[in-house]
Image (cartoon, rainbow, N blue to C red):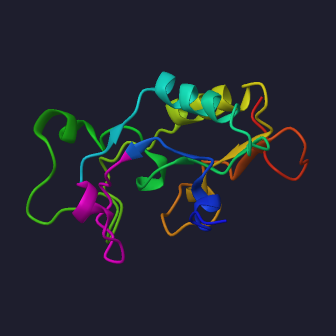
Amino acid sequence: MGGVPAIREVQFSIIQNRGCFGGCNFCAIQLHQGRRVTSRSADSIVAEAERMTHEPDFKGYIHDVGGPTANFRFPSCREQMLRGMCSGGKHCLAPTTCSHMIVDHSDYLKILRRVRELPGVKKCSSAAASGSTTPAPATVPVSWTETAPSSPSIP
């Protein structure tokens, strides 16, 4: 007995980034993690997933490989890379999407493919794409699995 019952919801999840450039009014992530997105290396994420496969309670499902900002892994735009965050109350996603924002999930999708290919992993998914409060671009599939024909699969 004992333990934290809610840990089951996140026990087999991996944080791949911190921070959020969105600035959405309903969210406090920007206040406690910052506006700049920082990401772990792909190798670090895959290594953590591989370690999970050896845990006694692991059944093959990694419930979330993600983080805030709809799983973006890099700065929001070239300006941010050169000059830092915009000042004067400008935000990348709210109230409208900035025209300079770079929307590219190719690196993130490569990581998900690598995690899914690990022996013992049946399915990995992104909570942002499957119903969390973080808005996810339509380009991010809901889940990756080889067994459920209704889920989009990654070749």
Give percent across and percent down for residue 39.
Answer: 37, 37
Q: How many marks?
A: 0
Q: Residue at x 64, y 27 (%)?
A: 50
In the image, is residue 93 above or below residue 103?
Answer: below
- Magenta stretch? 18-34
In the rendered structure, does residue 98 fall within the stretch colored magenta?
Answer: no
In the figure, 135 relative to 19: above or below? below
| Type of secondary structure dominating the magenta stretch | loop
Asked whether 152 or 120 is in front, the reply is 120
- Closer to the camera in the image, 70 or 93: 70
Image quarter hosting the C terminus: top right
Rendering coords of residue 47 (x, y %): 55, 25
- Residue 78 is left or right of residue 122, and the answer is left
Determine whether, in the image, residue 72 is placed left or right of residue 53.
Answer: left
On the rendered image, what quadrant is the N terminus found in? bottom right
- Residue at 32% x, 68% y is 94
